[in-house]
Image (spheres, rainbow, N blue to C red):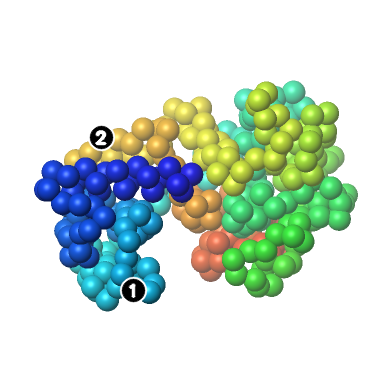
Amino acid sequence: STRSTYSAKWKRFSLWCGTRGLNPLQVPVHTILDYLLSLKEQGLALSSLKVHLAAISAFHPWDGAGSVFSNPMVTRFLKGFERLHPLVRRPVPTWDLNLVITRLMGAPFEPMATCSMLYLSWKTAFLVAITSARRVSELRALTSEPPYTVFHKDKVQLRPHPAFLPKVVSAFHINQDILPVFFPKPHASRKEQQLHSLDVRRALAFYIERTKPFRKSTQLFIAVADRMKGLPVSSQRISSWITSCIRTCYDLAGVPTMHTTAHSTRAQASSSAFLAHIPIQEICRAATWSSVHTFASHYAIVQHSRDDAAFGSAVLNSAVSQSDPAS
């Protein structure tokens, strides 16, 4: 909780003051800034320094009105710190869409009628995320029942619950996703049958049907582990499902999740860390492919990636490429 976090950071500040013979309740602002600089030398980022500053502000009897953050000296310090130490975001690791969807067509993700509920959850969440271009918070706002999830013979319509309010209201967030069936029955070949296993409508139908016996919420994505079974999952859990799905596909293919080069000075990142703590929209944007897969064409992934529209929800009605799946 915030209280326990602040208490721990105030204790740390008090110990720092104690080693210097200072009373933490009486130190001036410039001494507090010296403390923040000592934290920076220990590797803390600006966001962490602000938490420490807020904790000190909660316990320190400040003179005058306003918080410590409105103090002119503190304001100048924070602005200067940000200019000297700007936040540098690491590039999102790229991953091979063709590799992932090829593995999704087989075990352990198939057959959907009998596969593990965890693998079914991973695959369904991944397919919805990669084809709908939704933020993970918007995926969490999807429900399992009409009129928010509506199945038609040739498509499925998805829209978030009306109580959900996105950060930026736009036509993209208000409008529903309409995802067409991918290689519908009857199938003329084994290849078409395999490609149909990537159909989002099919995945959603299996997922909703198999979760009915233990479902305790209308939220689309629910927990399948025994302790929380049937209860709605958090946005963080949905993110974990999607990244776990990608990592598992790489493991099944026997391909490392990240490739080092001759100039790399660090060991290859572990599988468990690959794509961790990265927004789902950025992960989707980082998908690459050596050749355009039928799946990518059908769900407009290629065009919307080129347009940098975060794989927008509009679906192309153009002819489906008949290229073979990547192996």
Residue 60, percent across and down? 32, 58
Secondary structure type for disc 2: loop
Q: Is residue 290 left or right of residue 48?
A: right
Q: Is residue 204 above or below residue 155?
A: above
Tell me the crowding category of disc 1: few under 14, some 14 to 19, or many 20 or more residues within 10 angstroms, Cα based: few
User: Toward the viewer: 55 or 241?
Assistant: 55
Q: Is residue 326 left or right of residue 222?
A: left
Secondary structure type for disc 1: loop
Residue at 47 percent of width and 29 percent of height: 251
In the picture, the disc for residue 64 is 1
Q: Which of the 4 image quadrants contains residue 34? A: bottom left
Q: Is residue 111 visible?
A: yes
Amino acid type, residue under disc 2 in the picture: Ala
Q: What residue is disc 2 on?
A: 267
Q: Is residue 190 visible?
A: no
Residue 248, percent across and down? 51, 31
